[in-house]
Image (cartoon, coloured by chain):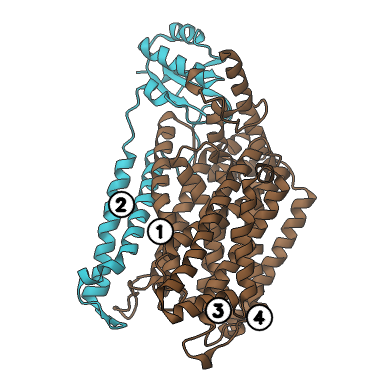
Amino acid sequence: MSNKVVQAMYNDDDILLDAVKETRSSNHHIEEVYTPFPVHGLEKAMGLKDTRIAITAFMYGCVGFMFSIWMMNYMMIEQWPQDIGGKPSFSFIQNMPAFVPIMFEMSVFFAAHLMVITFYMRSKLWPFKEAENPDPRTTDDMFVMEVLVDNNEAELVSFLEKTGTVEIKVTEK
Amino acid sequence: MSSHYEAPIRRPLIVGEKSYHDITVEVAAPVEGKANKLWWTAFTIALLAFLWGLGSIIYTIGTGIGVWGLNKTVGWAWDITNFVWWVGIGHAGTLISAVLLLFRQKWRMGINRSAEAMTIFSVVQAGLFPVIHMGRVWNAHFVLPIPNQFGTLWTNFNSPLLWDVFAISTYLSVSLVFWWTGLLPDFAMLRDRAIRPFQKKIYSLLSFGWSGRAKDWQRFEEVSLVLAGLATPLVLSVHTIVSFDFATSVIPGWHTTIFPPYFVAGAVFSGFAMVNTLLIIMRKVSNLEAYITVQHIELMNIVIMITGSIVGCAYITELFIAWYSGVEYEQYAFLNRATGPYWWAYLLMMSCNVFSPQFMWSKKLRTSIMFSFFISIVVNIGMWFERFVIIVTSLHRDYLPSSWTMFSPTFVDIGIYVGTIGFFFVLFLLYARTFPVIAQAEVKSILKSSGEHYKKLRDGNHE
């Protein structure tokens, strides 16, 4: 398969959305869409699967919760129990109410940070990462749809020209 | 156009005939332009205040906490007042970006970036006070449960002060990633517009290579939503835990169950006031009146009015419960607050926090920019005095009358406080010149539904 793509540029989100729907229904493969802001309904139109990142956040939160229980039990109950202010820490369950704030904070800490790290990893975002948007205007007011060429360059270009594009470019990826 | 429908009764959030490109240009303008005289003046003043504060901090650390006005009876005063004041101010940023996101309030988009910046900068100020108050700041890491040479010297997880350590550090770090994740597309916008190579390099570093793919946006929105869902209980827990510092003690005037909701309401109250203070100036200086409209200020004033009234209810409830409890120590603590030697601080607190926000019932006053600015300053003063009243008046008359004393701050106390205000403004002014101060990607996504021009076009078509 060649890596040739046609980049069709649009200057309006509604036109882009219609173009994406049209392109998909005429069985062209949309490689990628770059937009300057979240266009609602775009992921549905492109047929993207739902993201599962919220589920990971829940799992990370559970890890944080368990970790905080283990940590406080180990440090205060098992390894060095103390009698602080006449309230001995010899039993986890009796000390548990005082541990609730930190259980909560740790759950949030783990869920939030690990989810964001997962997001950065999955979307390949980190310092010194080179940006890959095809045109600097796609962070301003331009929307780009990349469609894969499958030995049908001329046909594809003429098809895309009718979808309201303002600029069209064929490039090697 | 039907997908962008919004009820005509809703006033536009973006004034004027804006296109997507106009938004880009206007948000980038303060970053790309040169700083004016006003900015330099403000920055110099803030920097001088910061340096004075730095001097006071160094003097405190070098000499000891004895240089503060604290004494044996009043062991907590300005430092913890300032700590609670700054943490409270921080709350508005999270409230705006997280709670208003969950409630789908579109007006948050014009102000959330700056409000979150304010959150982070003020939590930094707040964190300074307990650390300095430790005296031996080089041992500050002892508050963390990290393995050490004693093997078994762990922190005390029963202590509300340790809960504070966890709450504040979780809050600061989660707010930071929330803020930064939202900033990525906007840094990318600045990166792609940058002409000078140095600027381009900096903004590509900051934007983490954001490219705006459809999948990235999908994840971005999900992450924002989940972070908002996490940050909402987090922000409530933080001030709840701050109030536990007092509420779990056995000091009359502190040992009350109303503290958590009362502190949270007070925090939102003071935070929104600070957002108003900052944004009323910023919208003017950075020419962002089309995005931070009078409606935004009006809505914040309404929040100030409501939370101010909640705080007022809490004050009155406290007085009633003290009387109703029949505990004479409790009764005396409140009688002493209102009529004792610190009556003037109590009066200032009552008039600034309960009385002054009631002006906002008037539409004319709450849509007046000058008046809103004035009230926002008044509220900030009032909320500082609230914490001072709670802390100092509860302590200065001990159980033992021979220990009764007064507190007066030294120049070092005042210096550190003024220094943190300076530090805060140094950070905020630098932010206003280098960061995209409006969440432009989000604002673009509501342009067609809430932009004045599009609303007019649509309403015209339907008639």
**Residue sitting at x 70%, y 48%:** B281
Give the quadrant of the C terminus of chain A: top left
Q: In the rendered image, what is the letter of the chain coloured brown?
A: B
Both labels 3 and 1 in a single chain: yes
What is the three-letter code of the residue carrying label 4?
Thr
Count of marks overlaid on the render: 4
**Residue under pointer 4:** B410
Q: In this view, does B187 lie above or below A101?
A: above
What is the three-letter code of the residue carrying label 3?
Asn
Label 3 Cα neighbours within 10 Å, binned few <14 / some 14-19 / many ≥20: some
For mark 3, give the secondary structure: helix
Residue B306 locus on image (x, y percent): 54, 51
Give the quadrant of the N terminus of chain A: top left
Which numbered mark, 4 or 2, is in the foreground of this view?
A: 4
Q: Which of marks 4 and 1 is nearer the N terminus?
A: 1
Give the Cα separation between the discs numbered 3 and 2: 46 Å
State which chain disc 2 sits on. Answer: A
Chain A tint in image: cyan
Which numbered mark, 3 or 1, is in the foreground of this view?
A: 3
Q: Residue B24 falls in which quadrant of the image?
A: top right
